Amino acid sequence: MPHKHTINSATAAVALAMSCLGLTACSGMTRQEKNTAIGAGVGAIGGSILTGGSTSGTLGGAAVGGVIGHEVNKK
């Protein structure tokens, strides 16, 4: 059975890859919408890593990251 750290690293890598692939569909989005999506993705990955892969940590990280991304460069 693989180590928990290996599984978490693999999960984070897959989530990051999926986030990057998902952003290719964002060509019609505004800069603020893109920042929100990127912030949510990065926050979800960070929350997952910091809480050992818990669902609440992932969702909380996505929420916080989305808010931060939404506010970046806001005019």
Image (cartoon, rainbow, N blue to C red):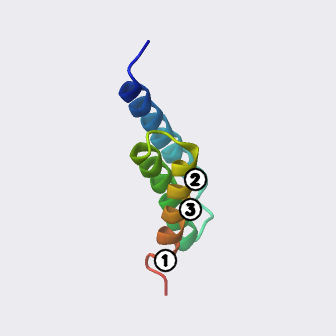
Residue at image position (46%, 51%) is 47
Q: Could you say which quadrant of the image residue 32 lies in? A: bottom right
Question: Mark 2 and mark 1: span between their CA atoms?
Answer: 19 Å
Q: Which residue is mark 1?
A: 71
What amino acid type is highlighted by mark number 2?
Leu
Mark 1, Cα crowd under 10 Å, few <14 / some 14-19 / many 20+, is some
Q: Are marks 2 and 1 in contact (CB under 8 Å)?
A: no
Residue 61, horizontal then vertical, whole percent: 50, 56
Question: Mark 3 and mark 1: span between their CA atoms?
Answer: 13 Å
Front in this rendered view, residue 30 or 67: 67
The mark lying in front, picked from 3 and 1, is 3
Position of 30 with respect to 45 (left or right) is: right
Residue 27, horizontal then vertical, whole percent: 58, 59
Image quarter where the N terminus lies is top left
Q: Could you say which quadrant of the image residue 3 lies in? A: top left
Mark 2, Cα crowd under 10 Å, few <14 / some 14-19 / many 20+, is some
Q: Which residue is mark 2?
A: 59
Residue 35 higher or lower than 74, as above or below:
above
Residue 38, horizontal then vertical, whole percent: 49, 59
Q: Which residue is mark 3?
A: 63
Residue 34 higher or lower than 44, as above or below:
below
What amino acid type is highlighted by mark number 3?
Ala
Looking at the image, is mark 3 or mark 1 earlier in the sequence? 3
Q: Secondary structure at mark 1?
A: helix
Q: Secondary structure at mark 2?
A: helix
Residue at image position (51%, 50%) is 57
Question: Mark 2 and mark 3: span between their CA atoms?
Answer: 6 Å
Q: Secondary structure at mark 3?
A: helix
Residue 74, horizontal then vertical, whole percent: 48, 82
Q: Are marks 2 and 3 in contact (CB under 8 Å)?
A: yes
